[in-house]
């Protein structure tokens, strides 16, 4: 049975989420991906069709992309279009209507964006009224995302399927070897971060906390994994705070399980999150975690057992939480073990894939699952 995926520009955790879904669902469905050309390498051996889709509103380009996609869908005749990302909704919904594609499913990977102007507020209002309400089903990756979308799409059309990770791949790595590769020593206390370098990830708050901690804990080191449009700005800020000996930007890495083996704690100071895959990965690596106190984070992290929650954009509280973990290595190990068990029980990729497959089955008339 044919399924079309329409994907907005994506990186990091969203790509990992989609890769796991593709691998699991391709055994049951013939999936073609429509997305930006830069995702073709990521798609690998899966069928891929380049689509000129970009973030933001670009009226002429977007209309042309809608027309191009509608022609592709008309030719391919999928029974279901699975949409990833809000911008993809703007493109896929009218294209699917024009091509008479019967079913529309949307995965909401993040909370709704906050408009910064009246123009954006009006544009988002149109999108919500005329696009989100045209969907047959919405998958929210957390209850926090579901709560935001509920007034728009209605209870009967929304379901929460939390992100999952392959927790087994985080075992068996040597902490000593992981540290040696980064020229870190046993006496260092290593704080790790994995994030796309964009404002929503709050990395400036982490650097402020590093500025507070460097004098209290001279053996502390910060490893920042990830890339993005703010990298140069954050590196400049790092130099301004005289943090060069303490902070390293590694850019994008594909050896995350090995890197995490050499860390003592994982931190994510986000200002907004759907459901963070990097936090789940850190928990799978048996690390205590310190994360922003956001609704979606509270679905993953149990304060005091998994690590600590701190108020968003609060560098002193972030620094204090890191010190608490550094001072009690026994408690830190206990938190790591708790985190691994929690991920294995609730956030495995098999659960995520099977729950998504059941939604496909329901929408395509192969049995009711709701």
Image (cartoon, helix red, strand yellow):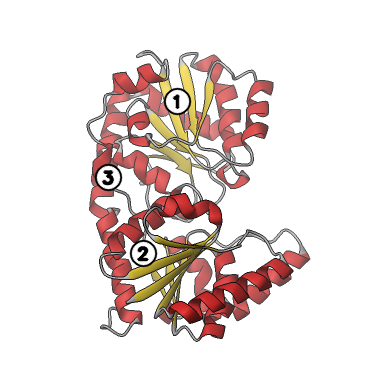
Q: Residue furthest front?
A: 75
Question: Marks 1/2: CA distance?
Answer: 34 Å
Q: Residue at x 40, y 44 (%)?
A: 279
Disc 2 target residue: 161
Q: Residue 312 sits in which quadrant?
A: top right
**Alpha carbon of mark 2 to alpha carbon of mark 3: how far?**
17 Å
Q: Secondary structure at mark 1?
A: helix
Q: Nearer the viewer, residue 238 or 265?
A: 238
Which label sits on residue 167? 3
Q: Is residue 37 left or right of residue 161?
A: right
Foreground pick, 310 / 188:
188
> Which x, y percent locates residue 36?
55, 58
Q: Is residue 216 above or below residue 257?
A: above
Which numbered disc, 3 or 1, marks the residue closer to the eye? 3
Q: Quadrant location of residue 204?
A: top right
The residue at which mark 1 appears reads as: 323
Secondary structure of residue under mark 2: loop
- Choose top left, top right, bottom left or bottom right for residue 117: bottom right
Q: Do the numbered discs 3 and 1 sit on residues whose CB atoms are within 8 Å?
A: no
Distance in Å between CA atoms under marks 3 and 1: 27 Å
Note whether residue 240 is visible. yes
Seen at 26% across and 83% down, the residue is 366
Q: Residues within 10 Å of mark 1 (few under 14, many from 20)?
A: some
- Which image quarter is the C terminus in? bottom left
């Amino acid at each position: 049975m044919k399924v079309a995926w329409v994907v907005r520009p994506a990186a990091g955790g969203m790509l990992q989420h989609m890769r796991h879904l593709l691998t699991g669902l391709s055994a049951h469905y013939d999936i073609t991906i429509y997305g930006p050309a830069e995702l073709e390498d990521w798609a690998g051996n899966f069928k891929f069709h380049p689509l000129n889709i970009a973030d933001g509103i670009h009226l002429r380009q977007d209309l042309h992309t809608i027309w191009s996609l509608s022609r592709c869908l008309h030719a391919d005749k999928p029974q279901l279009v699975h949409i990833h990302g809000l911008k993809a909704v703007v493109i896929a919904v009218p294209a699917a209507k024009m091509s008479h594609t019967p079913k529309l499913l949307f995965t909401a990977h993040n909370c709704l964006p906050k408009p910064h102007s009246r123009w954006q507020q009006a544009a988002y209002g149109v999108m919500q009224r005329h696009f989100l309400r045209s969907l047959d089903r919405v998958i929210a990756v957390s209850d926090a995302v579901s709560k935001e979308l509920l007034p728009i799409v209605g209870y009967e059309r929304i379901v929460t399927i939390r992100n999952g990770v392959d927790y087994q791949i985080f075992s068996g790595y040597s902490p000593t070897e992981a540290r040696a590769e980064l020229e870190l020593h046993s006496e260092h206390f290593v704080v790790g971060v994995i994030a796309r370098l964009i404002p929503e990830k709050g990395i400036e708050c982490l650097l402020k906390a590093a500025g507070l901690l460097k004098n209290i804990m001279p053996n502390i080191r910060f490893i920042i994994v990830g890339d993005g449009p703010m990298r140069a700005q954050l590196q400049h800020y790092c130099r301004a705070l005289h943090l060069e000996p303490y902070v390293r930007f590694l850019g994008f890495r594909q050896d995350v399980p090995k890197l995490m083996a050499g860390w003592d704690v994982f931190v994510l100071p986000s200002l907004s999150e759907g459901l963070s895959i990097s936090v789940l990965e850190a928990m799978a690596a048996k690390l205590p975690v310190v994360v922003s106190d956001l609704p979606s984070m509270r679905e993953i992290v149990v304060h005091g057992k998994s690590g600590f929650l701190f108020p968003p954009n609060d560098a002193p509280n972030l620094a204090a939480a890191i010190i608490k973990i550094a001072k009690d290595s026994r408690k830190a190990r206990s938190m790591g073990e708790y985190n691994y068990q929690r991920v294995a029980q609730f956030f495995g990729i098999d659960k995520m894939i099977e729950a998504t497959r059941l939604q496909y089955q329901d929408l395509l008339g192969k049995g009711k699952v709701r």
